[in-house]
Image (tube, helix red, strand yellow):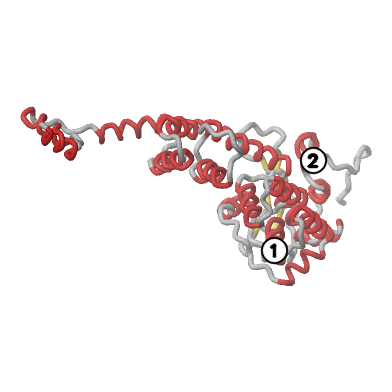
Amino acid sequence: MSRFTIYQDNYADTTIVSNLFIDEYMKDANDAQLKIYLYLLRMMSAHLSTSVSDIADKFNHTEKDVMRALKYWEKNRLLSLEYDESKTLSGIRLLDVSDRPAGADIVSLAPVVPLPTKAALSEKSASPASFAEDRPAFEKPAYTLDDLKEFKNNEETAQILFVAEQYIGKTLSPSEIKTILFFSDKLGFSADLIDYLIEYCVEKGKKDFRYIEKVAIGWAEEGITTPKQAAKAARKYDKIVYDVMKALGKTSSPTKTEADYVNKWIKEYGFTSDIISEACRRTVLAVDKNRFGYADSILSNWHAGNVRHKADIKLMDDAFARRKTPARTAPGNSQFNQFMQNDYDFDALEREILSN
């Protein structure tokens, strides 16, 4: 018996886009990120294969642009990049977050057909597991002159560098260009986020690229991928800094040293605002000068004592009180010990005796 084909009269050549994507994700994505994600949806719906190089050719992007867009959507947990043993991108799995309650595992959809490509093979795997392992380091690669030339010749990059020079007020040095390349290539920052990063730092009076790089790494460690997320994090941090200033009785704008203290307490020590407030309260009761240094000594001690909650502070206080309680002494020696522990002014005592 011969094979036959079944046709559907009402078949429509369409690609379905989630309303959640339109409502929550589309507004923060740039042009390249949107086009590439929609194209992946279209290819998955049609059960067609593609590659990084094919996507780059179709939208007139570089292969690195495509990889940055893919990593952006991976950070936003709309897709998962799959790699083979040689760290070669071998597939993309689109993820469904529309019905996922908070804290639930990701539900997988049908994966896109594997992506055969030689593009970005030298890039380190950015799959969720390996990315989590690599994130704390964010080491800047040793970029070559060819890397810089390719970066500067990209149309979008040229605009980033031009805007950066306007903010900084001078022509960027090769080292500074490498730093911006690092933001784009290693941290995965979009042009919009790099623009906002430099603007944010310059508005704070910081044009030093070492400072800008430190802020960028901090944002990357927090998973910030859009200017909107960066602005929200900056407002929250600035509020904490000024709350600390107020708690320590200071009305001036925070200096760099003072802001660095707060940054250490929050990011390095991981303390919440209630623990920092308690340290500030104790500082104000104890000293009138060098309050930031005194508060830092308290918080450093708590950090060494593995304080994580306010209840832990009481445990440390109780342990300290037990150590300070003097041992009981024999009744016959108490007066002698009390005498020896007093701090007498023997010169004054001698003058008083001679005057009699």
Q: Residues within 10 Å of mark 1 (few under 14, many from 20)?
A: many
Res. 55 in view: no
Residue found farthest to the left: 332
The residue type indicated by label 2 comes to: Met
Residue with the mark numbered 2:
26
Residue found farthest to the top: 331
- Residue 4: percent from left, percent from top: 88, 48
Mark sitting earlier along the chain (1/2): 2
Q: Is residue 334 left or right of residue 183?
A: left
For this rendering, which residue is in front, 52 or 161? 161
The residue type indicated by label 1 comes to: Lys
For this rendering, which residue is in front, 234 or 129? 234
For this rendering, which residue is in front, 339 or 167? 339
Q: For the residue labelled by badge 1, is the local secondary structure a helix, a strand or a loop?
A: helix
Residue 31: image tag? none
Task: Identify the residue at image location x=77%, y=61%.
Answer: 63
Residue with the mark numbered 1:
178
Res. 304 in view: yes
Task: Identify the residue at image location x=76%, y=52%.
Answer: 167
Task: Identify the residue at image location x=81%, y=53%.
Answer: 48
Q: Find residue 87 and report its image quarter.
A: bottom right
- Residue 54: percent from left, percent from top: 82, 60
Task: Identify the residue at image location x=57%, y=43%.
Answer: 259
Residue found farthest to the bottom: 145
Please tell me how many numbered marks the rendered image carries: 2
- Residue 256: percent from left, percent from top: 58, 47
Q: Is residue 53 left or right of residue 179?
A: right
Q: For the residue labelled by badge 2, is the local secondary structure a helix, a strand or a loop?
A: helix
Alpha carbons under labels 1 and 2: distance apart: 30 Å
